[in-house]
Amino acid sequence: MLPSSLLPPLRLSAPPLSGRIEPAVTLSTVARLVASGAAVSKADLVTAAGLARTTVSTAVDELLARGVLRLDGTRPTAGRGRPADRLALSPRGGHVLLADVGATNAHLAVVDLSQQVLAHAHVDVDVRDGPDAVLRTVETQLTALRASTMGDVPARAVVIGLPGPVDGNLGIPVRPPIMPGWHAYPVSARLQQTFACPAVLENDVNLRALGEARALPADQVPLLFVKVGTGIGGGLVSAAGVLHHGADGAAGDIGHVRVRGAPDDACVCGNVGCIEAVASAGAIARRLGTATIADVGALVARGDPAAVGAVRDAAGLIGELVATLVHFYNPARVTIGGVLTAASDELLAGVRSVVYQRALPLATRNLVLANSVLGEHAGLAGATVLGIEQVLSPDSIGALLAERPAPTRR
Ligand SMILES: [Zn+2]
């Protein structure tokens, strides 16, 4: 597969336009609409942004003159008008570096501001080795990927996802149960220093939720993503299409909820009977005596009766949890992801049957319950969205413009 086909086009959010509009907000809006592919000409932008033609024209001219946008041929217009200039983000505008770190492996990639994946790698890491060893691998790999893309293009942002609770504002993990030594480690500060650009830290399931929501049609939110892997985690994208973090960043941390009928197995958090301790792929691996959760996936894919039975039991418990969450948040879509869904439809089928049996009709009338459409690359998709939105935000786009020659005024 070519790197550029790794990800589908992803929608980017635009800052709200109301009252007196600052020039930086207009520039950010125009750049994001072009970067997401939602608008590729001035006429498109007038419609999509709801801004006056002259406002759009001034912003486009400035972004072109400063080398943030470029002309990418023309496209025919309706009627007899002359063909319209086609706009695109300049490939020289900057790179965004991505690291989606799971419990036992990491997806790394370099993308440009037009969402093209320029290079990517999949490496084994073990978060139990601690932050220094894992981040050193991430830094080495991202540096090598950047070198492979050629051209002297600056890194504009680095986005990292980690498999535990994080404080995105401080850029630190917060008491992650499966990541010894990571509590309060300055992840963002370290990456910011290494790559000399802003760093964004996010929970890995939140990244998947965001990636999935932005790759799907806009009516598929609110979206709840449930990842069943080594642990069980949730991510919630609101009706506005943005991540719901909650007051402390702990929203969606559903692995330590207890559901009806769960056995009293001990959990890494110190409680017993947590959904993660009884129904995760990790819990199934312990029960079956396999070395890794990938082994569980392989057994399920092969139809091994003990493995399929264990997944059915887990699906019943996860279904109870999802039915409760559906009642509370009334999502348009619940996406199930992780190693077990890649292996078979057994987990999805089991969760579905419980949710439709338990939840009341109003909450399930239009509910879509499906496997992840992006699979193992959902996290990279979410990281792409966060990274490009950061670089093209009203607060940051000024920096992008400042280092380029000023437009010539006529
Ligand atoms: Zn627990």
Image: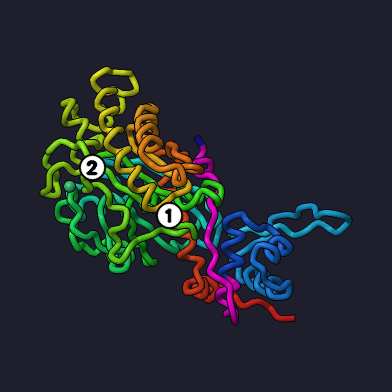
Q: Is residue 147 visible?
A: no
* Mark 2 to mark 1 CA distance (whole Å): 23 Å
Q: Residue at x 15, y 52 (%)?
A: 180
Instruction: Find numbered disc 1 in the image and state the secondary structure of the residue it sits on.
Output: strand
Q: Which residues are magenta?
A: 2-27
Taking 235 as reference, is 410 above or below it?
Answer: below
Q: Residue at x 75, y 55 (%)?
A: 74
Colour convention: rainbow
Report the magenta stretch's main SS: loop
Q: Quadrant of residue 346?
A: top left
Q: Residues within 10 Å of mark 1 (few under 14, many from 20)?
A: many
Q: Residue at x 62, y 69 (%)?
A: 63
Magenta-drawn stretch contains 24: yes
Relative to 14, 88 lies left or right: right
Relative to 405, 291 lies left or right: left
Which labelled disc corresponds to residue 237? 1
Amino acid type at circle 2 is Val
Amino acid type at circle 1 is Val
* Residue 161 at x, y percent in the picture: 33, 53
Q: Where, quadrant-wise, is the C terminus in this rendering?
A: bottom right
Mark 2 and ligand 1: say if the CB distance to the nearest ligand atom is below 8 Å. no
